[in-house]
Image (cartoon, rainbow, N blue to C red):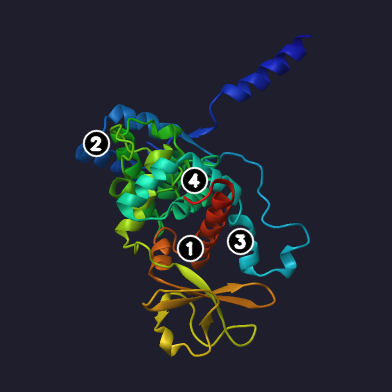
Amino acid sequence: MQMIKLSIFLVLFSLFTPLQAIDYTEEIEVKKFMQSMQSRYGFKKDTLQKWFSKVRKKSHVRRKRRRTCYIGRCRSTGSWDRYSFQHLKRSREGGYFMHKFHDTLTKAYKKYGIPPEYISAIIGIESEYGVRRGDYFVFDRLVHLSFDKEDRRAKFYRKQLKALLRLSVREDINPKKIRGSSSGAIGLAQFIPSTYKAFAVDFNKDGKKQMNNVVDAIGSIAYYLKRHHWQRGGDVAVRVRYEGSRFDELPTGYTHTYYRKNLENIEPRDEFNYRGKVSLIKLDRGGYDELWYGGKNFYVITRYNHSSYYAMSVHQLAQKIKKSYEKRYGKF
């Protein structure tokens, strides 16, 4: 009986005690960092000592592994098939999200010119409409990335750590409780801390900029895209026809742009009223390449995440969300 009680106690103890912690306060670079935070930004020494003396050894929050494609399907598919399987989900949830936050999305469109389906798509991809806000304790993760080894990325992550601590003071948040991505991105919009101050907006006018607040997240995404020169009413992308099944004639990707008149034998499959230079976006479908024109607004989406596949997934999910919304609720 005593052994059973002891076993129960040990299980409960393991559940409610903090994860194994590491003391970073004796590290030379950490000392310099803490001194800088004290002298430049007024952080209290005791507070910094408390945070940096108990850094979780494992900053990852265990979650059920996510399936990237169906069993037996991965080997025969292209990179876009696998990527899109992961990201082009939840259009029905996206339609409901547009319905639920109709007024906020309308306000964002009127103020910044960003269509509601694109804001909804980004929130869907980044956080599954708030269900998944991060698998890491951001403070601990950034400490590890900043100080565990000296490499070219350490300076970047120290900048994020500094921004996170300053953000926590401005918004009155305990930095040890913030969860986010493996690179420190936080909230429904998954802003990295250094962009938070520049692009997060207090869209609900409560005096705080909170990325875990849906209204603020909607306004902040719209503001971010506007600041990167989104063209109100402009087309984003359209699939095109070309000769053959694989496209290798010209460099592809959003960094290469062309005048459409110089792209012989490449024609849009649907209406595309964009008149500026276009990029050619190639999607590997396994047995063939799917080719698209990308306009200025496509490039703007890549400022959120520097990946053609990411921007295309936002565009395609946005179109699916719009159709889902219109089917259930009518025109927005």
Given this view, does label 4 or label 1 mark the residue nearer the observer? 4
Q: Residue 98 — which label?
A: 4
Check disc 2 and give the amino acid type.
Gln
Q: How busy is the neighbourhood of tag 3: few (under 14 within 10 Å), some, or many (20 plus)?
A: some
Given this view, does label 2 or label 3 mark the residue nearer the observer? 3
Residue 104 visible in this rendered orientation of the protein? yes
* Image position, residue 227 (x, y; %): 30, 57
Q: How busy is the neighbourhood of tag 1: few (under 14 within 10 Å), some, or many (20 plus)?
A: many
Residue identified by numbered label 3: 84
Q: Residue 311 — which label?
A: 1
Residue 134 visible in this rendered orientation of the protein? no
| Front one among 11 and 306 | 306
* Image position, residue 179 (x, y; %): 48, 39
Check disc 1 and give the amino acid type.
Ala
Dividing the picture into quadrants, the one containing residue 32 is: top left
* Image position, residue 1 (x, y; %): 79, 9
Given this view, does label 4 or label 2 mark the residue nearer the observer? 4
Q: Is residue 296 above or below residue 218?
A: below
Q: CA distance from mark 4 to mark 3?
A: 21 Å
| Front one among 287 and 7 | 287
Residue at image point 26% right, 39% down: 37
Chain-order first, disc 2 or disc 3: 2
Q: CA distance from mark 2 to mark 3?
A: 46 Å
Q: Residue 41 — which label?
A: none
Chain-order first, disc 4 or disc 1: 4
Q: How busy is the neighbourhood of tag 2: few (under 14 within 10 Å), some, or many (20 plus)?
A: some
Q: Residue 38 — which label?
A: 2
Whether the residues at callouts 2 and 1 have beta carbons within 8 Å, the answer is no
Check disc 4 and give the amino acid type.
Met
